[in-house]
């Protein structure tokens, strides 16, 4: 089963960037009223809101693109995490190596019925893994837990700390 995180993750980034964009724009337009037209500074104040909004659009776009290029795949034997826009990184965790699964529900995610799954494993490269902002996170965690138990029984593996 292939799962994609929700773009709700970027809500804080969006609101923060919009707030600062509006603040800078208002300040610049107020300065344009105050500064005499003959000063060379007027050009800087005139173009500053455009530059700020270009940076804001870049930040928001990059944030959305990073989440869009992230996916989680749960198979019968592996949990596969793929991320990256230009340089792709794929992390593969064997299901039987998972020690613990917990659920985190931040307030803003609960408003949209989404949540995080935190996976603790004995995998050397990824001992803690966060599956962010998932729809149906409770059912996914139950399915993942069932897969862990099934794989451990099939392989005859027991987890020791």
Image: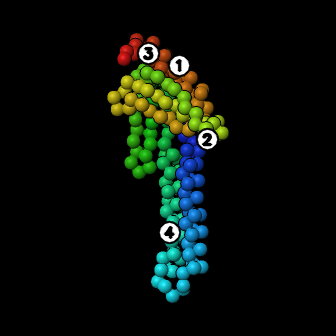
Q: CA distance from mark 2 to mark 4?
A: 30 Å
Task: Identify the residue position indicated by label 2 in the image.
Answer: 108
Q: Which mark, by number, is residue 152?
A: 3
Compared to residue 106, the image places residue 32 above or below, namely below
Which one is in front, 139 or 113? Answer: 113
- Asked whether residue 1 is in view, the answer is no
Asked if the residues shown at circle 2 and circle 1 are in contact, with their CB atoms under 8 angstroms apart, the answer is no
- Asked whether residue 44 is in view, the answer is yes
Compared to residue 83, the image places residue 40 above or below, namely below
Q: CA distance from mark 1 to mark 4?
A: 52 Å
Q: CA distance from mark 4 to mark 3?
A: 56 Å
Q: Which mark, by number, is residue 51?
A: 4
Mark before the other along the chain sequence, 2 or 1: 2
Residue 4: quadrant of the picture: top right
**Crowding at label 4, few (<14), some or many (≥20) Cα neighbours within 10 Å?**
few
Instruction: Give percent across and percent down for residue 66.
Output: 48, 48
State left or right for residue 18 relative to residue 51. right
Mark before the other along the chain sequence, 2 or 4: 4
Which one is in front, 132 or 107? Answer: 107
Residue at left 59%, top 74%? 30
Instruction: Give percent across and percent down for residue 110.
Output: 63, 36
């Amino acid at each position: 089963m292939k799962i994609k995180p929700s773009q709700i993750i970027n809500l804080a980034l969006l609101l923060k960037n919009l707030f600062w964009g509006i603040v800078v724009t208002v300040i610049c337009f107020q300065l344009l009223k105050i500064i005499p037209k003959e000063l060379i500074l007027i050009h800087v104040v005139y173009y500053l809101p455009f530059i700020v909004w270009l940076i804001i659009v870049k930040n928001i776009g990059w944030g959305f693109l990073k989440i869009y290029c992230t996916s989680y795949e749960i198979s019968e034997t592996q949990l596969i995490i793929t991320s990256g826009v230009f340089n792709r990184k794929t992390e593969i965790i064997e299901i039987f190596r998972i020690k613990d699964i917990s659920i985190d529900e931040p307030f803003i995610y609960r408003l949209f019925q989404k949540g995080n799954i935190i996976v603790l494993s004995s995998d050397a490269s990824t001992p803690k893994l966060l599956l962010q902002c998932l729809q149906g996170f409770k059912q996914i965690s139950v399915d993942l837990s069932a897969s862990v138990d099934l794989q451990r029984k099939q392989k005859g593996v027991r987890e020791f700390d």
